Image: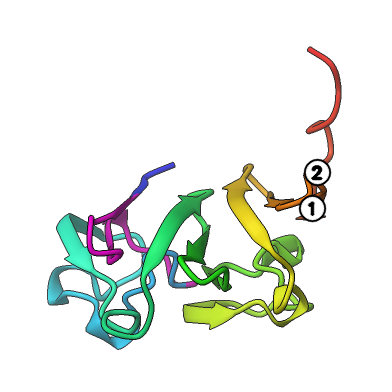
Amino acid sequence: GQVCMAVSQRGEIWSWGRNQACGVLGLGPDIPSCAKKDGQAVPLPTPVLCLRHKLRVAQVTTSGLTTICLSHLGAVLSWGCGIDGVHGHGHRLDHPSPKVIAGLVGVPIVQVAMGPRHALILGREGEVISWGHARGAWEAQ
């Protein structure tokens, strides 16, 4: 996609790229003035301030429309477009700021990944949890 995410050594998320109205960058009201309109770019890495000093992030993944992160304590949060329920909050409304995925609270998670319109979570025991629209995702190539 046209979105980049990075995790610093201190566990902070930095995002940049094309801003979407659904909030894939996770910047919420802290979006730079250069990208206030839908589709405008945030040209430089910008900290996701709403998570700073609240949790330490271990991993982040994005489809370009939705973003999911895993904290060092195992919490899974998501934000962005709700198309196909890919953010995992049980509905299709957009979330411009990070929100804990309630259905994964207490589940030991070790890795998060995203496809174009689906999410994949790897549990500590090797189980895979997925949701969203995965048409064609499982076909052998």
Which residue corresponds to the image point at 49% horizontal and 72% vertical from the top-left? Answer: 22
Instruction: Pick whichever, 71 or 83, lies toward us.
Output: 71
- Please provide percent x and percent y for residue 27: 31, 75
Indicate the quadrant containing the C terminus: top left, top right, bottom left or bottom right: top right
The residue beneath circle 1 is: 130
Label 2 is placed on what type of residue? Ala
- Please provide percent x and percent y for residue 3: 36, 49
Label 1 is placed on what type of residue? Ser
Circles 2 and 1 in contact, beta carbons < 8 Å: yes
Magenta region: 5-22
Q: From the viewer's perspective, tell me whether residue 141 is left or right of residue 31.
A: right
Which residue corresponds to the image point at 59% horizontal and 77% vertical from the top-left? Answer: 94
Instruction: Pick whichever, 93 or 118, lies toward us.
Output: 118
The residue beneath circle 2 is: 134
> For residue 44: magenta?
no
Which corner quadrant of the image does residue 138 belong to?
A: top right
> For residue 17: magenta?
yes
Give the image's coloring scheme.
rainbow
Which corner quadrant of the image does residue 132 belong to?
A: bottom right
Report how far apart the C-alphas of labels 2 and 1 lie in the structure: 9 Å
